Amino acid sequence: MLVMFLMGSLSFFGNVNHLLGSLLSLEMMSLSVMFYWIWWGMSIGGEIYGVMIFLVVGVCVSVIGLCMVVEVSRCYDSSYCSVVHVVGC
C-alpha cells in the first residue's frame, strides 16, 4: 500500500501538466489510502466501521484531488485546460 501511494505521488508531481496522468496518479493514491483505512477499520471496529471509513475517505480524497488537478491545470494555456477551467470546482 505504501509503495502504491509513493508511486502515485511521484507520478502526480511528474505529470502536473498532463491532466489524465495526474488524475490516474491521484486515483492510485486515493486507492492506497482507502485500502489502508479499510484494513485498519476492519481490525479495530468490524465491517460497518470499515465500510464507512472507506466511503468517507474515498469521497474526500477524490474530491480534493480533482480540485487540485483543476487548480494546477488553470496555470496552463491550452484548449483542454480551458474546458476544465469552466467545469472546475
Image (tube, grey):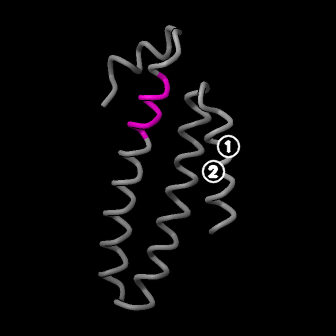
Residue at the spot 53% in from the left edge and 9% down from the top edge: 78
Judge left or right: residue 71 versus residue 31.
left
Label drawn at residue 73: none
Q: Secondary structure at mark 1?
A: helix
Reply above or below: 4 against 69. Answer: below
Q: Which residue is mark 1?
A: 11
Boundaries of the magenta span: 66-73
Counting from the top left corner in percent of width and height, residue 25 is at 59, 45
Where does the C terminus fall, quadrant-wise?
top left
- The picture quadrant where one finds residue 67 is top left
Counting from the top left corner in percent of width and height, residue 23 is at 53, 38
Is residue 67 on the magenta stretch? yes
Question: What amino acid is at disc 1?
Answer: Ser
Question: What amino acid is at disc 2?
Answer: Gly
Reply above or below: 68 against 27. Answer: above
Residue at the spot 38% in from the left edge and 19% down from the top edge: 85
Counting from the top left corner in percent of width and height, residue 50 is at 37, 78
Decide: few, some or many residues near mark 1? Use Cα within 10 Å; few <14, some 14-19, many ≥20.
some
> Which is the main secondary structure of the residues drawn in magenta?
helix
Residue at the spot 34% in from the left edge and 71% down from the top edge: 53
Label drawn at residue 8: 2
* Mark 1 vs 2: CB contact within 8 A: yes
Is residue 11 on the magenta stretch? no
